[in-house]
Image: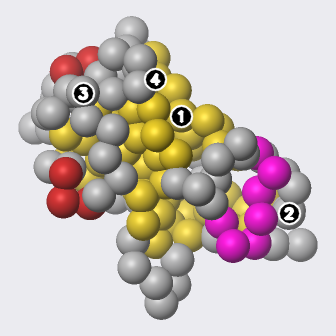
Amino acid sequence: QLQLVESGGGLVQPGGSLRLSCAASGFTVDDYAIGWFRQAPGKEREGVSCISSSGGNTRYADSVKGRFTISRDNTKNTVYLQMNSLKPEDTAVYYCAATGRKYSISLMEGSYDYWGQGTQVTVSS
């Protein structure tokens, strides 16, 4: 059974950092492009970042460029989202998602087939 599990969320002060992990099971993650999305209370889910299956192509939402970095370790079947200089507006539930379109770098929800359950990130003093 194909499964994605996010971890690494928590409470952090503004300006702090967190690293989210997306661990895949039931499939080989290097056959899939992976995206990170987030949903804040009362808002629609939005694409944050994505990475192609090889890791050669990445894409970021304008709101996180220069602060977030996506990476993958296919040997560990895991994709990461390093989040630095966090702001209160980054508060949301963060989800990872997978698509079999290996070269995809889409930030559109509809491009993804499999989703994790989400991890809460709260940025507050």
Indicate whether residue 16 is drawn in magenta.
Answer: no
Could you tell me the amino acid type at mark 1?
Ile
Labelled pair 1, 4 in contact (Cβ < 8 Å)? yes
Alpha carbon distance from label 3 to label 1 = 15 Å
Where residue 66 appears, as percent x and y from the top left, is: 71, 42
Alpha carbon distance from label 1 to label 4 = 7 Å
Could you tell me the amino acid type at mark 2?
Pro
Alpha carbon distance from label 2 to label 1 = 20 Å
Tag shown at residue 72: 4
Q: Quadrant of the N terminus?
A: top left
Q: What color scheme is it?
A: secondary structure
Residue 91 drawn above or below residue 23: below
Magenta-tinted stretch: 84-90
Mark 3 vs mark 4: give the one in front.
Answer: 3
Could you tell me the amino acid type at mark 4?
Arg
Precedes in sequence: disc 2 or disc 4: 2
Mark 2 vs mark 1: give the one in front.
Answer: 1
Q: Quadrant of the C terminus?
A: bottom right
Residue 53 drawn above or below residue 41: above
Tag shown at residue 103: 3
Labelled pair 3, 4 in contact (Cβ < 8 Å)? no
Q: Which residue is mark 1?
A: 70
Secondary structure category for the residue under label 1: strand
Tag shown at residue 14: 2
Precedes in sequence: disc 3 or disc 4: 4
